Structure formats: C-alpha cells, structure tokens
Image (tube, grey):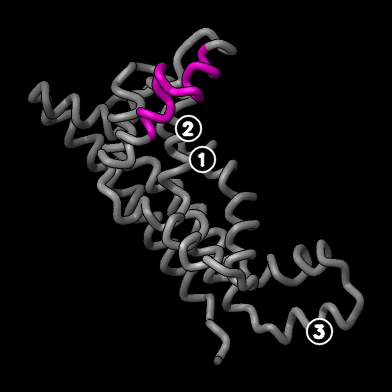
C-alpha cells in the first residue's frame, strides 16, 4: 500500500473541496436564479470536463501552465520552480476538472427552492446575507454536501488529467490512482489490487451518500 500517495490524494481532494465550496455556492446560486444572455454557453463550458477526454483537458492545462506560457513563466519567476509537474499545478487542474461536480448539484439544490420562499423572506425585510444563511443554505444543504462528496471522490480517482499535468513525482504529484498505474506497470498486482479495493470502497460509499442526499431534494412543481 502506497500510503504517501494515498495521503497526497486525500490532501488534494480536501483542498479542492475547500476551494470549490464558496465557488460552487456562488456559481450554483447564480445559475439557478439569474437569467442572462448566453447562460446556456456558461453552463456548457462548466460541463465540458464531463465530456472531454481527460487527456485533452490535461493537454490544454499542461500547455497553459507550461514554461512557455505566460502563466507558467510568471509563476516560475515568483516561486523559482515550474507550475506544471508540481502540487500547486495539480491543485489548479483539480479545481478545473471538478467544476461540474461541485457546481451542478448545488445549482439543482438552489433550483429546488420555491420562489415563494425567497419572496416571503424579502417581504419580511431580511437582508440578502441573512436570507442566504438562514433560509437558502439550510434548504439546499443536501445538494451542497452531495457536491462536496462527489468532488472528493472524483479527485481521488482522477487519472488522466493528473498524469498529464503532474506526472508521477513521489510525495509531490503521485496520487493513489497514479500509484495503481505504476504498480500495474511493474506487475505488482497485489499492491495494485489492494489500492484499487480501497478506492472502490471509498467511491462506493461516496456515491451512495450522494444519492441519498440528492433524494432529499424535491423540486418544486412548475
């Protein structure tokens, strides 16, 4: 069992969850209730990681963060090491390929809140912040938790983007999924099988929890 890779995966998943929580709340709430021109294009762009092959997304991220890119050069001038093939680059990639997993469940949760509830809160003179924290967030919490669970599980199991952007640097970018691949390539099926079983159980528990929470969100009738 590659404990270092497992701990790195948990660290990456936890940081991804924490960063995407406020982003998902803001974007999910805005997409649920605001109407603006080109909204469908924004939703399509956010959903791209679901349909793009991981290697394609990983290639574009690698180009964007590489030493020849303005972002890569700026980062290297500040921190004296490249952004690509580093944990920081891996985290940025993780945030991007997890956007739909974080935003879509929250958007559906906010959409399930009846407009009459928000209108009643405004009529009572509640501020927007109090309305959000006291009414909207408690009603949408199953979707919020489901988004966090899916983001965590997806980060643990992601392979293609991680390999393209981070490679397999022990303690830096080698996640549990990459370690399974490396062990399989080395014909160490025992270690690969053990790590695969751990990921299987984590994924099964995560998805089960997500489905249970999503069933608690009942959409209001149109």
Circle 2 residue: 91
Circle 3 residue: 120
Q: Which quadrant does the N terminus fall into?
A: top left
Q: CA distance from mark 1 to mark 3?
A: 35 Å
Is the stretch drawn in magenta largely helix, strand or loop?
A: helix
Q: CA distance from mark 3 to mark 2?
A: 41 Å
Question: Tag 1: Cα neighbours inside 10 Å, few (<14), some, or many (≥20)?
Answer: many
Q: Are marks 1 and 2 in contact (CB under 8 Å)?
A: yes
- Mark 1 or mark 3, earlier in chain: 1
Where is residue 195 drawn, in percent x and y? 25, 35
Q: Residue furthest bottom?
A: 222
Determine whether 68 is above or below 42 in the image.
above
| Left or right of 28 in this view: 154 | left
Determine whether 144 is above or below 184 in the image.
below
Magenta highlight on residue 73: yes
| Magenta stretch, residue numbers | 61-76
**Which label belongs to residue 16?**
1
| Left or right of 185 in this view: 175 | right
Determine whether 201 is above or below 144 in the image.
above
Q: Secondary structure at mark 1?
A: helix
Where is residue 141 drawn, in percent x and y? 61, 65
Determine the residue positioned at 14% across, 30% down.
190
Q: Residue furthest right?
A: 125
Where is residue 202 drawn, in percent x and y? 35, 48
Q: CA distance from mark 1 to mark 2?
A: 7 Å
Q: Residue furthest left?
A: 187
Question: Tag 3: Cα neighbours inside 10 Å, few (<14), some, or many (≥20)?
Answer: few
Q: Secondary structure at mark 2?
A: helix
Q: Secondary structure at mark 3?
A: helix
């Amino acid at each position: 069992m590659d404990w270092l890779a497992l701990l790195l995966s948990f660290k990456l998943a936890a940081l991804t969850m924490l960063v995407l929580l406020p982003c998902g709340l803001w974007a999910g709430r805005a997409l649920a209730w605001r109407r603006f021109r080109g909204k469908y294009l924004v939703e399509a762009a956010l959903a791209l990681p679901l349909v793009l092959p991981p290697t394609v997304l990983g290639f574009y991220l690698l180009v964007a963060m590489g030493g020849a890119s303005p972002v890569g050069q700026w980062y290297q001038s500040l921190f004296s090491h490249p952004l690509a093939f580093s944990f920081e680059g891996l985290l940025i990639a993780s945030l991007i390929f997890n956007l739909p997993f974080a935003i879509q469940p929250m958007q559906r949760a906010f959409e399930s809140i009846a407009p009459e509830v928000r209108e009643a809160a405004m009529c009572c003179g509640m501020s927007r912040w109090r309305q959000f924290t006291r009414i909207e967030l408690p009603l949408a919490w199953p979707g919020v938790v489901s988004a966090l669970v899916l983001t965590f599980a997806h980060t643990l199991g992601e392979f293609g983007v991680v390999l393209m952007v981070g490679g397999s640097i022990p303690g830096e970018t080698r996640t549990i999924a990459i370690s399974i691949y490396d062990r399989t390539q080395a014909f160490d099926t025992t270690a690969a099988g053990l790590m695969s079983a751990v990921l299987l159980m984590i994924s099964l528990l995560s998805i089960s929890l997500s489905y249970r929470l999503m069933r608690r969100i009942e959409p209001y009738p149109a």
